[in-house]
Image: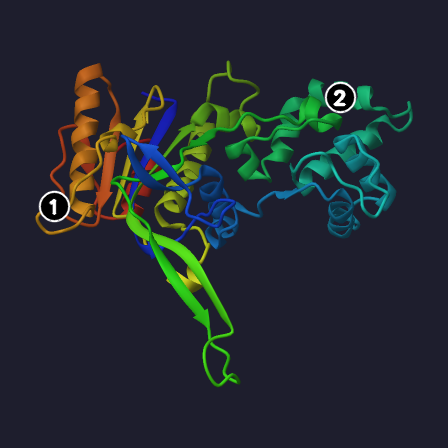
Amino acid sequence: MNENFINFHILISHSPSCLNRDDMNMQKSAIFGGKRRVRVSSQSLKRTMRTSDYYRQHLGEPSVRTNHLADFQHQAVAALSDRYDEHLIIQAIDYISGKDTSADNAKDDAVASWVLEEIAYFCDQIKKLEEGGVDAKKLQKLIEKDGLAFRQAMANGLDIALSGRMATSGLMSEVGKIDGALAVAHAITTHAVDADIDWFTAVDDLQALGSAHLGTQEFSSGVFYRYASLNLKQLQVNIGLLSDMKSDETAESRTKALNIAAHVLHMLATEVPSAKQQSFAAHNLADVALVGFSHQPVSLANAFEKPIQVDNKGGFREPSIKELNSYWDKVHRGYGLIERCSEFALDSVVLPTGILTKPTLPELESWLRNNGQA
């Protein structure tokens, strides 16, 4: 059975840190279950993954996200000048953005995601139309006629296929919009958090007494629940393996999507935002990774609607793991959900019926690549 959704549930305990801040330089937070929780935004988590060394090593270069069109134009010309004439590259960017990028300070209305191979694809389409004259409408019709090739070019910006792209001008808004395949929740602590304040000083070695600077920084520690859901069919459409959502997937296309899913799992379990890490070094790995194949997205965040209390050992980690698995069991029994699941945990955990145990994260990744087969 080929369920279309993969649900990722991660518990990761961070030592004192300040991983994601708001406009007041305070930790991002949320009220859940009537109590304050520390929060790491989905935007922060997704950027952490796409800019990681792991992403570059296994999934390629991420897209370039910018509204500085003039600067991106210079970058694109430098990267593609061995394949296309400079004028053609600039013409392609102008058509895609709907802007005149010749000015040194040319900017778009919003930050957009750019892929160099997308520029190359547009260059090829413009060359096809050169004899009969080129305009935006002709380009749009040509691209829509062969949308699969466009999506295959876009596959070089895999983070766009995962997170999606919205645009408001140019051909990017007509043919370049992409519905994201990966939905990522804001990570929140499983328990209530009272933040601490670090009063820090910058000591001036050439000043006899006192400090040259005094500042404050909010910080805390906690067990965070990360949740994400991956639409496998949408991913296959986004990278040109399927023509549309109505197409039947093939064994080959699903295998490619599952390989990407395994990398997403790895990053969700291991990548940590870089904010204030020079001060706190909260480079913690996940304690638990639970993965399931399902016919629908299913979050387990409500396992922590009632804030976790410290156990008799004085920690939040173990009772959070216990409650996650207990709530999974309640939801699946209550709704009669059928989901193939496996879990990796650093500690020995008693799992409910229906969840397989995987002793290592690589083995969980292999199980995922194998379509949830033991």
Q: What residue is drawn where x is 87% and y is 42%?
A: 87
Left or right position of 269 against 203: left
Residue 333 spot, x, y in % from top left: 17, 19
Give the labeled residue for mark 1. 311
Secondary structure beneath disc 2?
A: helix
Give the labeled residue for mark 2. 140
Residue 105 spot, x, y in % from top left: 81, 46
Question: Of the residues shown, which amino acid type is indicated by label 2?
Answer: Gln
Residue 240 or 185: which is nearer the viewer? 185
Tell me if mark 2 has few (under 14), some (14-19) or many (20+) residues whose alpha carbon lies within 10 angstroms of its own: some
Residue 236 or 274: which is nearer the viewer? 274
Left or right position of 215 against 96: left
Residue 374 visible in this rendered orientation of the protein? no
Question: Of the residues shown, which amino acid type is indicated by label 1?
Answer: Asp
Q: Is the residue under label 1 in contact with that under label 2 (CB below 8 Å)?
A: no
Left or right position of 145 against 317: right
Q: What residue is drawn where x is 51% and y is 17%?
A: 245
Residue 277 spot, x, y in % from top left: 42, 59
Relative to 69, is 54 above or below? below
Relative to 343, is 195 above or below? below
Secondary structure beneath disc 1?
A: loop
What is the quadrant of residue 291 in the picture? Answer: top left
Residue 34 spot, x, y in % from top left: 28, 31
Q: What residue is drawn where x is 50% and y is 34%?
A: 162
Q: What residue is drawn where x is 17% and y is 35%?
A: 323
What is the quadrant of residue 91 in the picture? Answer: top right
